[in-house]
Structure formats: structure tokens, C-alpha cells
Image (cartoon, rainbow, N blue to C red):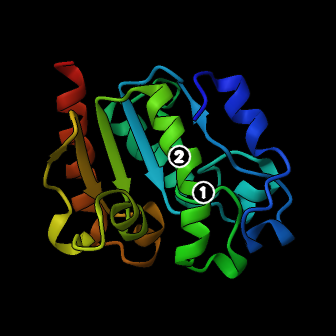
């Protein structure tokens, strides 16, 4: 584990811990306020993220930005990362060994950010952070307290692009996060 951002970011340059490195253009490490009270964790980069090296800049990211804007969560005040740092082929769900290869980087990011709230975007984030016993459908919208951090599982913004009925629940969940942010 690294006790500073510079060493952590250097440690991932040229990473070859799993097969996802074979086709990546960029490692998508994370972005935002490195002392944020709120950390958002997604699944993995898509094509736009891979080409720009920044998480959540594609269609799902633009949708998330609109929700942030509507609810009053400044994107520059939160930190955003993913379970895996390289794009899975065809945007498939990361395999267990791929997620495992990246989790130490993410754990180190959490240690350095020291968030009070972590928003888990989708099933992959939920299961890799809180465990396989959790399901997104049953856990979504419910605060889970663990090791001094409040977790809010919600839909991944990409799921909203496939099923617009989930937008209302996503919006409610982010409003709940904003309420908690306002009392920190």
C-alpha cells in the first residue's frame, strides 16, 4: 500500500496484472477531489473512458453528470473510480480475476481519499466491495454501514440507458446521498 497519490499512480503505470492490459489505450485510474467526502465506484471503463483515460466521460457519464447537476452535487467535489482500471472487451462485466487484480489499487484509493460515503454504481461494484451475498436489486437505495463508511448501492448509469424506469430510483438514491453530504 502507498501512503501518497504520486507513488500509487506510478505503481499502476504499465500494469500487466491481468489480460485487460492487452487492448487498453489508457489506464483509467480515477478523477476528482482526492480529499472528497463522497467516492463513486463504477464497474470499468468503456470506449470513451479508455481513449481519454478518465472515468465516466461517455454516455453513462454524461447521464450521471446531468443527475449531479440537477441534484446539486458538484462533480469536482467527489472522487470517481472503477473496480477495474482497463476496459473489458465489448464492455463486458469484468471477470473475477480481473477485478481481483485491480482491487488493491482501488483499496489504496479509498485509503487515500478517506471518504465518508461510497456510492456503489451497479452490481459489479456492490459485489466486489461488500461481497457476493449482496444483490443490487435488493440493496439499491438502502444505506449500508461498514467499517465507518456509509455505502449507498444504486444503479449503474449505463443501466439507466437500457431501462429508463430506473432513472427515478437512481435520482432518489443520489438525492439521499446529497442529503447526507449536506450534514457532513
Q: Is residue 17 left or right of residue 64?
A: right
Is residue 94 visible from the viewing direction of this image? Answer: no
- Residue 135 in the image: x percent, y percent? 24, 73
x 43%, y 44%: residue: 40
Residue occupied by mark 2: 106
Q: Secondary structure at mark 1?
A: helix
Give the quarter of the image for residue 129. Answer: bottom left
Question: Residue most toward the front?
Answer: 1
Give the position of the C terminus as an image quadrant.
Answer: top left
Is residue 127 visible from the viewing direction of this image? Answer: yes
Estimate how packed mark 2 is, as few (under 14), some (14 to 19) or many (20 or more) residues with alpha carbons within 10 Å: many
x 49%, y 32%: residue: 75
Real-space Cα separation, disc 1 to disc 2, in angstroms: 7 Å
x 38%, y 65%: residue: 122
- Residue 36 in the image: x percent, y percent? 43, 24
- Residue 114 in the image: x percent, y percent? 39, 26
Q: Up-down: is 16 above or below 30?
A: below
Q: Is residue 105 left or right of residue 67?
A: right
Estimate how packed mark 1 is, as few (under 14), some (14 to 19) or many (20 or more) residues with alpha carbons within 10 Å: some
Q: Up-down: is 144 above or below 1?
A: below
x 71%, y 55%: residue: 49
Give the position of the N terminus as an image quadrant.
Answer: top right
Q: Secondary structure at mark 2?
A: helix
Residue occupied by mark 1: 102
Callouts 1 and 2 close, C-beta under 8 Å: yes
Give the quarter of the image for residue 159. Answer: bottom left
User: Viewer-proximal residue, 161 or 10?
Assistant: 10
Amino acid at each position: 500500500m502507498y501512503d501518497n497519490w504520486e507513488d500509487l499512480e506510478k505503481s499502476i503505470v504499465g500494469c500487466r496484472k491481468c489480460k485487460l492490459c492487452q487492448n487498453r489505450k489508457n489506464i483509467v485510474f480515477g478523477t476528482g477531489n482526492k480529499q472528497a467526502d463522497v467516492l463513486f465506484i463504477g464497474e470499468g471503463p468503456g470506449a470513451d473512458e479508455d481513449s481519454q483515460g478518465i472515468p465516466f466521460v461517455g454516455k453513462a457519464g454524461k447521464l450521471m453528470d446531468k443527475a449531479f447537476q440537477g441534484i446539486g452535487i458538484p462533480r469536482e467535489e467527489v472522487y470517481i473510480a472503477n473496480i477495474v482500471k482497463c476496459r473489458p472487451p465489448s464492455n463486458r462485466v469484468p471477470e473475477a480475476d480481473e477485478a481481483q487484480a485491480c482491487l488493491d489499487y482501488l483499496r489504496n484509493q479509498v485509503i487515500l481519499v478517506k471518504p465518508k460515503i461510497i456510492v456503489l454504481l451497479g452490481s459489479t461494484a456492490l459485489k466486489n466491495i461488500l461481497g457476493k451475498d449482496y444483490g443490487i436489486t435488493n440493496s439499491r437505495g438502502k444505506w449500508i454501514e461498514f467499517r465507518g463508511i456509509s455505502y449507498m448501492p444504486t444503479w449503474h448509469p449505463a443501466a439507466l440507458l437500457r431501462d429508463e424506469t430506473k432513472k427515478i430510483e437512481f435520482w432518489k438514491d443520489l438525492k439521499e446521498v446529497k442529503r447526507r453530504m449536506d450534514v457532513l
